[in-house]
Image (spheres, rainbow, N blue to C red):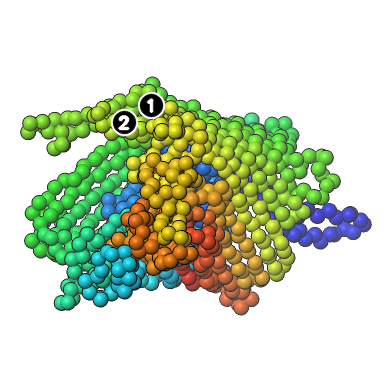
Amino acid sequence: GYQALRVELGEANEYNVKLDDSGVVMDEVVVVAYGEQSRRSLVSSVSTIDEKSISNIPAVSPQEVLQGQASGVQIVQSSGVLGAATNIRIRGVASLTAGGDPLFVVDGVPMNDNGNGAISNDFGAASTLNPLMNIAMEDIESISVLKDAAAASLYGSRGSNGVVLITTKQGKAGTNNVSFGTSYGVGGPTNLYDMTNTEQYNEISNRYGFGTSPNDNFFDWQDAVTQRAETFRANLGFDGGNDKTRYYIGGAFTDDQNYVFGNEMQKYTGKMNLSHQVSDNFKIGANVSISRVNMDRIDAENSTFAPLTSAYLQSPWVDAYNEDGSYRQTGFIANVLAINDIALTEFITRRNFGNAYLQYTIPNIGRGSINLRSDWGIDEFQTEETIRYPEEISPGGYGYRRVLRDDKWLTTNTIDYSTPVGDRSNLTFLLGQSFETALREGIAVEGTGFAADPLRNVSSAANPSITSATRTAWALASFFGRLQYDFDDRVFVEGSFRRDGSSRFGADNRWGNFWAVGAGWNLSNEAFMRDQTFFNELKLRASYGLTGNERIGNFASLGLFGAGTVSDYNGAPGLRPIQPANPDLKWEQTSQFDVGVNMRIKNFFDLGVSFWHKETTDLLLNQTVPMSTGFTSFTQNAGDMTNTGVDIDFNFDVLRNQDWYVSIGGNVSFWRNEITSLPDATVDSDGNRFIQDPASAAQRAVVGRTANEFFLIRYNGINSETGDAEWLTKDGELTTEPGQGDRVFAGSAIPDFIGGVNFNVGYKGLNLSGLFNYTYGNLIMLDELRFTEDPDGFNRSTRLLDAWEQPGDDAFAPGAESTTVEDFPQRSTSQLNDGSFLRLRSITLSYDLPVSTLGIDWIKNLSIYARGNNLWTVTASDFRGQDPEVSDSGTNNLIQGESFFVVPQRKMYTFGLNVTF
């Protein structure tokens, strides 16, 4: 980690030598699958985010800190709603209807994601819940992203979407610390739509001959449903140890209030990591996390019960209150003020997560030693959702209650052997076995007709009913191994193999084999490189391997029957077929080739470049079938897809001395996605094979194109001479009467490139750091514009005030007499926007007080800071949305970059301190 220094030896008996920090990261220890490696010996592609980078991002969940800090990793905040899922794609989308999220592994234990990456709440609309929101950011020491097959193959069946390894803090021998941190932040939305007041509403209505308001009242619904966002955090930690025992104990509390009311979150977490060396050869340890998250979670978006959606749609002359101060019944668009003030909308999650292990070392086996390790882990997750609408909101009152448990157990046993071979070589191998299984159970009840509003329980309803009761399970058995060889710290060779058996596939196809091979060549250690001074480090690497995906329904290969009242026959209980059998269902597989170079030049410039190609075959598709079959869909293997790209990481150490430190770093990733085969897909009139999610009328996955291709009528604008809105026919001719047959492929939601830029400027104890992230070349569909820009809508955007009046006008909306007014808001490229953006994700100014020079011996470190988050965003000049980061279908691979009143991100200002005793 220091610059090399050559000293000429003379006649002196003593030499004073001082080495300067080189910033070289090649000796950094990197967490990889089932162990650690020095970055120097890596033959795979791994991005690492350290504790310092994590602490600079005021994130609610771990995924957020990866945004702009890891090449090849696309992060889209699916919603500004607290606790909403984050959409992560590592080196493109590797699946269509199977799960697309990476595998998350915390302290060596794969987290339970129920096969689909998220668990939703019934009244949360489109935004699903973040599976990592129960983890305290203060407990995390580092995050590693395994991107290629060589890195991810040991996780086999779940490696095709990449793997994210989260390592929590451990105590160190020889020191005992008490750390405390707290912060407070305020803020609001990054942007909101401008909607009409009553006067403007009437102006638009009079122009087009629509009904005007029945009174002159104006109620600002947008102002009524927004508030000042506030967040408070506090954490307390204890860490330390001696040669025998090491420990970390941490607790954290977060109280978060979003700028949209009805969205609050309180998070309580506790963490304990403990290891003890029982004897020279025997070690035991445990990592335990407990958490509880309380959320007030009114409908998020895509619902007339969602606060911000309702505020945009509600007519401006409709008041929320009657003259006597009671809440007004506002019809189809719900009175969300009443819901917020007097209704109960509670969502609670509890998660107990951790593992315990035994490790025994057998020394003196040849020239090496054998490590035996047995690990047992659990992931217990429970959600409780309670809805209670009183009489003023729902006549008679309404109650709902759902409890869901998803519990996972696993065991892993490994044998690890490392030995020198000769004088300059080393050999390491790992053999392992694991078994994991999960059981999910849930029940939901609802009722109507309550004698009094204070009665909360559904059992008090006059008409209670059970809406669902489910129980399902899955299991995965695995055997794996890895062999590593290095010669003279110059040549590195690695091979890995994993065999997985999943309960989700047909009896003859349950087992899948996954493997990878890789090699690295450290040229900087070759004799012919020793006398040059340009490269401090230079390494070439290449790998190829196969990973898999099994994230589908638990019984997708079986013929299933359903019971219940809908299956009754002539008053007697019965069964009905609900899913056809597919005994041939098998693994979806992704092969990946990766070649890269890592270098450090002149002790100030680090550069890493990776070229990669991924090919997914036997796509797991939830295929829609004609209703005449008696079914709606079934899962099959049908299709292939490729992703190709380049990842570039760089860092400049501009200045580094005793007082100053200046660095600029970042990354950029380019990629291209293409569907190469969909043999059983729908064929359109032009011969294009495609599939699409029924929830999207705008997007398709098309052979020869991308997985997220928009298929829309092209909007041409307002004719400046006639005032008519005009579109293009399929053949490119102007028309004022377009039809569905005029739809064409209009572009993709997948960006051309993404990346981030960070900077650090430090002078003694003062530090300024910042992070920008950017996306370029993707399109986003803002479906809410069909409503806000409808001249005959509930409420209207102020853009409609810019209407055509006379020849030569360059207007947004059609003229008063135009016959195209009715068709103006129809779905077309008018709602399709350029989603490119550059965002200042965070900027932090911190100061480490010189406590030692002040004579304060009982404080080891004291730092204060001010931080801004999402302070500045640059979008395309014609962008009409609130936020370019949208994905209202969460982790759905087939629907990306679409929005229906998605809550935009928050702009926050935070102040805090961290102290260590």
User: Closest to the observer: 700 or 389?
Assistant: 700
Q: In which quarter of the image is residue 411?
A: top left
Q: Position of residue 852 (x, y in %)?
A: 62, 73
Type of amino acid under label 1: Leu
Q: Is residue 4 visible?
A: yes
Q: Give the left or right position of residue 821, taking residue 780 as reference.
A: left
Task: Estimate the spatial distance between the alpha carbons at disc 1 and disc 2, rounded to whole Å.
Answer: 17 Å
Q: Position of residue 208 (x, y in %)?
A: 31, 64
- Residue annotated with mark 2: 625
Q: In which quarter of the image is residue 880?
A: bottom left
Which class describes the residues within 10 Å of circle 2: few (<14), some (14-19), or many (20+)? few
Residue at image point 30% right, 61% down: 792
Which class describes the residues within 10 Å of circle 1: few (<14), some (14-19), or many (20+)? many
Q: In which quarter of the image is residue 591?
A: top right
Type of amino acid under label 2: Val
**Is disc 2 placed on a helix, strand or loop?**
loop
- Residue annotated with mark 1: 585
Q: Where is residue 198 in the image (x, y as percent from the top left)?
A: 30, 72
Q: Give the left or right position of residue 511, taking residue 525 as reference.
A: left
**Is disc 1 placed on a helix, strand or loop?**
loop
**What number of labels is visible?**
2
